[in-house]
Amino acid sequence: MKNIVILISGGGSNMAAIVRAAEQQHWGQRLGARVAAVVSNKADAKGLVFAREHGVATEVLEHQGFASREAFDTALQQVIDRYDPAVVVLAGFMRILSPGFVAHYAGRLLNIHPSLLPAFTGLHTHQRALDAGCKFAGCTVHQVTAELDVGPIVEQAVVPVLPGDTAATLAARVLTQEHVIYPRAVANLLSTM
């Protein structure tokens, strides 16, 4: 059985979408995969409750207790590797990862970003799309590299920018597409392993 480890920092709605997909008989059985663990850098991350309710192991490793990003990433890698993951998924994990961590999981570390990359890397993507007058916005699943939000694109979804949209209304519409494409991208990667 292939293991998936998901990293979160908050509510974990993308994590929940992946857990639900993995629970579906045809998805999990076809891929021989399961979500083995959800790891958070915040003890109060609401997504941990969902994971526990669905029988997924949870772990918390708070980054504030470490002297450097590299020290945290080394400890995080040790936690993740206990689950022998085929794929590591960032689902709202709000930490920039060190090059050594990224290299350790090269080719099997995925992230989702709320823009149509390469446009609007970083934060505040929806407001930036509105400010730029974009007619379309969306989300991108990409492989993680040492450079922020520039790894190879795995999958994208597009939504229209509607008259009167705010960053919040646009974000909500994009999020519904994230929940569709992220489980599919994880499944597609697993099917190649």
Image (cartoon, rainbow, N blue to C red):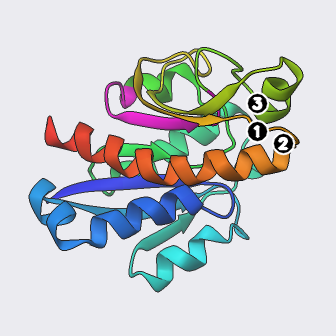
Q: Which residues are magenta?
A: 104-115
- Whether residue 105 appears in magenta in the rendering, the answer is yes
Observer able to see residue 3: yes
- Closer to the chain start, of discs 3 and 1, is 3
Which residue is drawn at the image coordinates 26% and 56% (left, top)? 3
* Position of 10 relative to 155 (above/below): below
Q: Are marks 2 and 1 in contact (CB under 8 Å)?
A: yes
Side (left or right) of 171 relative to 29:
right
Residue 125 - label: 3
Of tags 3 and 1, the one toward the viewer is 1
Amino acid type of the residue that numbered disc 2 sits on in the rendered structure:
Asp
Query: In whole angstroms, how far apart are the C-alphas of marks 3 and 1?
Result: 16 Å
Residue bearing the label numbered 1: 162
Q: Amino acid at mark 1?
A: Leu
Question: On the image, numbered disc 2 is attached to which residue?
Answer: 165
Q: Looking at the image, which is closer to me, 74 or 186?
A: 186
Neighbourhood count class around disc 2 (C-alpha, 10 Å): few under 14, some 14–19, many 20 upward? some
Total labels drawn: 3
